[in-house]
Image (cartoon, rainbow, N blue to C red):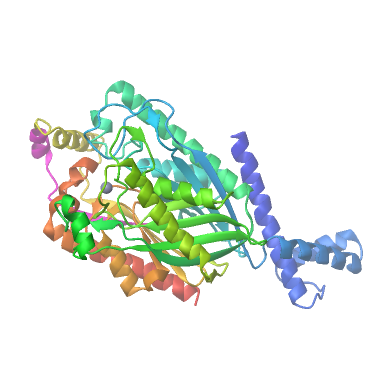
């Protein structure tokens, strides 16, 4: 609690200083006339009078203005933090059901990283990237509550992104029917302990980011990288090299690489936030690894010393890095993605004005074909261990009085960075159709669409993919423990909520 309280005090002091700076700047911009103000300025008038004469107050105002010019007024305040989250105990790996042995070795470390932003109006945001397969609703809520309590933030000011690496640990109850529910008691204990540790590590990284925040300039750009392949349309995967060479790869893809950079006022680059829409499934070994997003971040941090590179996964639920399954390929894709980012960084990048709007909503999405008690009683006896384990999970929910839910509180956030960037955060494993649609309906490469954000509860098929079926269309829901398939209107509902928030933000900030 001591650490948290100290940071809360620091954050509050920082907020008050921001108001002070802003108010003094207003006084000075208005001609430096030290007259009684009708608004917050009057607070400073009192302070100045306490100091003695008006001239004394005026000198103080000049000094404060100097502080304000050199410490963030009309600039972003930005800071980064990080905490290593590689498991220290043997732990089950997440993402593939086939790996039954806890991992003990690592190729590279896994990280929780944070970018803290604050605009001159005091609007704050915390963007968290995790080298993990996903995060479930319960753990996400715990992380957010800790940040809200410790740093005085609101839920709408927090965004959690996961890279979806399949070489990371089981994360609490995420993918419970495949992992947690089939683990033995000792492993379950380790899984829960790791989740506890994660909350602490993320808090540490957020504290570091707030503490290190400094006047900054943000810029944005968009590059390309082409290793993502539509995994539904190009089977067998052995043909991918040939198809790529002949230009006959099929199916929708999103090869954009959105990039946000933060530099201090001396021009030193200290943060890069970048995204890409592709499964982090190059590897399936029994060794901790961040997969291509981990190698891309490491490569960028090698190239730009003292820079924190953070990855967010786009709508890559139906995209794979192909070919795959070799360590050198994970490295190769990481380096290729990093190169796309470097190309953007080396080119002229538009400035992102210091204006931040953010929000977060949960909208109920309907599920269909919900099993009743009798069906669940039958399914728990199934020889399919995942079906049986999902049925047990749903029975527990029934016993706890909630019944089997027929809707899911689906998380959607839209953040506006400056006047250019609309950053949409969608929960779940979102197929590429969503990103392509939102970019085409909103602002192309200025619309960034993250999947795997805030709560990864299932695949999120488009209406097209739902109708086609297959793993992404609904076959995967059993591994996540969802009781049924998504309703065909889910896509329309998600898109309409994004539009609603987009319109509201753009009305507020014309
Ligand atoms: Zn996946």
Q: Is residue 229 left or right of residue 16?
A: left
Q: Is residue 371 left or right of residue 116?
A: left
Q: Residue at x 67, y 65 (%)?
A: 73
Quadrant containing the N terminus in the rendered view: top right
Name the quadrant containing residue 379: top left
| Residue furthest to the top | 186
**Residue 421: percent from the left, percent from the top?**
46, 68
**Residue 147: percent from the left, percent from the top?**
51, 45
- Asked if 84 appears above or below 275 in the picture, the reply is above
- Asked if 1 appears above or below 66 in the picture, the reply is above
- Asked if 302 appears above or below 314 in the picture, the reply is above
For the question of whether residue 20 can be seen, the reply is yes
Residue 82, magenta (yes or no): no
Front residue of 12/120: it is 120
Front residue of 379/119: it is 119
Magenta region: 357-379
**Residue 123: percent from the left, percent from the top?**
56, 61
**Residue 404: percent from the left, percent from the top?**
20, 43
Q: Residue at x 70, y 60 (%)?
A: 71
Name the quadrant containing residue 438: bottom left
Q: How many marks?
A: 0
For the question of whether residue 488 can be seen, the reply is no
Front residue of 372/430: it is 430
Q: Residue at x 30, y 52 (%)?
A: 409
Q: Residue at x 26, y 36 (%)?
A: 176
Q: Is residue 358 left or right of residue 7?
A: left
Front residue of 500/455: it is 455
Residue 378, magenta (yes or no): yes
């Amino acid at each position: 609690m001591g650490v948290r309280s100290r940071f809360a005090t620091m954050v509050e002091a920082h907020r008050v200083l921001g108001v002070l700076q802003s108010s003094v700047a207003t006084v000075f911009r208005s001609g430096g006339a030290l007259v009684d103000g009708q608004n917050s300025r009057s607070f400073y008038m009192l302070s100045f009078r306490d100091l003695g004469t008006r001239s004394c107050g005026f000198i103080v105002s000049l000094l404060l203005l100097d502080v304000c010019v050199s410490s963030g007024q009309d600039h972003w305040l930005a800071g980064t933090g990080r905490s290593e989250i590689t498991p220290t105990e043997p732990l089950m790996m997440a993402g593939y059901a086939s790996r039954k042995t806890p991992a003990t070795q690592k190729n590279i470390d896994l990280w929780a990283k944070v970018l803290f932003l604050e605009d001159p109006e005091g609007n704050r945001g915390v963007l968290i990237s995790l080298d993990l397969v996903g995060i479930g609703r319960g753990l996400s809520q715990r992380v957010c509550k800790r940040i809200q309590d410790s740093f005085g933030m609101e839920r709408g000011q927090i965004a959690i992104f996961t890279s979806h690496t399949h070489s990371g640990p089981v994360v609490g109850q995420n993918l419970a029917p495949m992992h947690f529910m089939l683990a033995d008691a000792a492993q379950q204990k380790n899984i829960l302990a790791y989740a506890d540790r994660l909350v602490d590590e993320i808090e540490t990284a957020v504290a570091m980011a707030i503490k290190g925040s400094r006047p900054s300039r943000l810029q944005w750009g968009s590059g390309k990288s082409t290793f993502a392949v539509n995994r539904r349309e190009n089977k067998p995967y052995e043909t991918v090299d040939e198809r790529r060479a002949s230009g006959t790869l099929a199916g929708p893809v999103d090869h954009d690489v959105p990039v946000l950079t933060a530099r201090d006022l001396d021009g030193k680059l200290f943060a890069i936030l970048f995204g890409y829409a592709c499964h982090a499934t190059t590897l399936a070994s029994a060794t901790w690894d961040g997969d291509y997003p981990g190698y891309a971040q490491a490569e960028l941090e090698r190239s730009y010393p003292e820079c924190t590179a953070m990855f967010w996964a786009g709508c890559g639920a139906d995209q794979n890095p192909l070919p795959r399954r070799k360590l050198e390929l994970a490295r190769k894709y990481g380096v290729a993605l990093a190169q796309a980012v470097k190309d953007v960084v080396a080119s002229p990048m538009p400035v992102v004005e210091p204006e931040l709007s953010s929000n977060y909503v949960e909208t109920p999405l309907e599920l269909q074909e919900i099993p009743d008690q009798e069906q669940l009683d039958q399914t728990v006896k199934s020889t399919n261990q995942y079906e049986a384990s999902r049925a047990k999970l749903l029975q527990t929910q029934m016993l706890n009085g909630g019944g089997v839910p027929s809707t899911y509180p689906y998380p959607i956030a839209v953040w506006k960075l400056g006047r250019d960037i609309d950053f949409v955060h969608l929960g779940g494993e979102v197929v590429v159709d969503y990103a392509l649609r939102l970019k085409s309906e909103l602002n192309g490469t200025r619309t960034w669409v993250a999947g795997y954000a805030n709560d990864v509860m299932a695949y999120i098929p488009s209406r097209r993919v739902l109708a086609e079926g297959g793993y992404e269309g609904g076959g995967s829901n059993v591994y996540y423990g969802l009781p049924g398939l998504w309703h065909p209107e889910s896509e329309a509902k998600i898109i309409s909520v994004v539009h609603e928030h987009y319109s509201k933000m753009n009305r507020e900030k014309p």
